[in-house]
Amino acid sequence: MSTATSTASEGKHYLNAKHTVLSWLLTVDHKRIGMMYLVSLVVFFLIGGAAAVLFRLELMTPAGDLLRSETYNKLFTMHGIVMIFFFLIPSIPAVLGNFLLPIMVGTRDVAFPKLNLASWYVFMLGGILAFVAIVGGGVDTGWTFYTPYSTMYANSNVILAVCGAFIAGFSSIMTALNFVVTIHKMRAPGLTWFRLPLFVWAMYATSLVVLLGTPVVAITLVMIFVERAFGLGIFNPALGGDPVLFQHLFWFYSHPAVYIMILPSMGVVSEIIACFSRRRIYGYKFVAYSSLAIAVIGFFVWGHHMFVSSQSTYAGMIFSFLTFFVAVPTAIKVLNWTMTMYKGSISLEAPMLYAFGFLGLFTIGGMTGLFLSTLATDIHLHDTYFVVAHFHYVMVGGGVMGFLGGLHFWWPKMTGRMYPEGWAIFAAIVIFVGFNLTFFPQFQLGYHGMPRRYHEYPADFQVLHIMSTAGASVLGFGYLLMAGYLGWSLKFGKKAGANPWDARGLEWETSSPPPTENFLVPPVVRHEAYAYEFESETSPESHPSSESSA
């Protein structure tokens, strides 16, 4: 048997049907763990999406005629907790990062494979506790667990939900620690820091935010537990506590958490734009350093969430300035992506459409964030649907579009199968249109003063809410269509070669899917990242040679 044939055969090892469920549950193969995370995240996405469907149906009419106010509160809380803690935060690092990062740096596995498996079990334990809290009566505090709702007034399973989020945080810390050590200590020969793919830089910056920020929110959740369970006065002013202290602690983590969700998508977009423009990323070092700049500056902007929460005007001015300043490294990325595409040989495959969608939607989300980081306009827009629209343009328009783009880009590498390109392009367009129809009307709702978290509203707002619900239906159809053709491709899709996009990078120098050990021969890196001026070691439909190099 030839080496290439042997490699292709080995590449199907981790997906082979003959292996038992137990072999998956006990695996330490980073690729299998990434696939297990993918299945888990799909389940949580369906749960969070089901909640969104119900409260969007409620909002089609001004009167609260479908759901009671308490049920409505529990549904939007459930949607937020599940989507943020159990989908958006882990989506790209846990799935694409776990699967691809060791291959991208040219090593067999992450630094601590058993810890990697433990992270999935910890994540599932946290998710199960949150799900039990939901089905056992629900949580009505909002996903932020604001005090005094979470410590005094909420008549719901707050403690169980807080424990679920607390435990899930340890999963993120385990994954981040693995990534940092792997990037520092296990890079292939010749893979210097400035030859790393920008996706790896994004994972590195994200991991630093996770390691520094997650312990803060974990301690905050413990304080909620202690106050609610034992009556200690931490946030309750009647017991000598300070409710604003909770907001400081929560947002010190939760605004950097925005970049935990966005930085990985930025890394994905860098890979996609370079591949489908056939050019090295313009200003590579600036893009790499901007990821670190976003991670650092993100820790100094939490106060813009508290302009109306007894914070002094002078502190508000400082936080407003810093929030504007964090937009600078983000703008650098957008400029450099645009310059990369300028005079590039652009091809419009499905991953590139998602990258375009990311650029458009995230830019709108970022620009509308400037209204919320300005003291005067934030007072008017605070806690209105303008905030809801801005948040979703950043989180869904940025985080989810980046995740879907990366999933389509590396799907052939992960599964060894191609999806139907025509259906993928159609679904990307449907998702883009549905998203804008869902959330753009909410900017106008917020501008006119419609408060969020209300299930009854003046009849004047009904048309915009109907548009938003109709858009959610289109968006949901796009997601289901995507799930359908990706599932179909697992059995009926055309077999993928090692490098179906003729991309650059170590992950494209091994078979699709990769063998258990990733490379039969340890790779040696000889070129800069995105060296499209050089011939790829593997042709678009071939298997790799016995020696892997990039």
Image: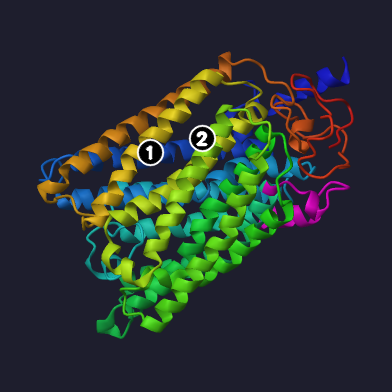
User: Magenta residues, as a range?
Assistant: 177-198
Q: Which residue is mark 1?
A: 435
User: Would residue 233 be found to the left or right of residue 430 on screen?
Assistant: left
Give percent across and percent down for residue 172: 56, 55
x and y percent of residue 498 in the render? 74, 25
Residue shown at the point (63%, 62%) measured from the top left: 208
- State which tag comes first along the sequence, 1 or 2: 2
Query: Residue 116 or 394: which is nearer the viewer?
Result: 394
The image's colour scheme reads rainbow
Q: Which mark is residue 39?
A: 2
Point out residue 18 in the picture as x, y percentages from the top left corner: 64, 21
* Element carrying mark 1: helix
Q: Which mark is residue 498?
A: none
Front residue of this view, candidates 310 and 175 = 310
Residue depicted at 76% across the width and 20% down the height: 9
Three-letter amino acid code of the residue under disc 2: Val
Which residue extends farthest bottom? 240
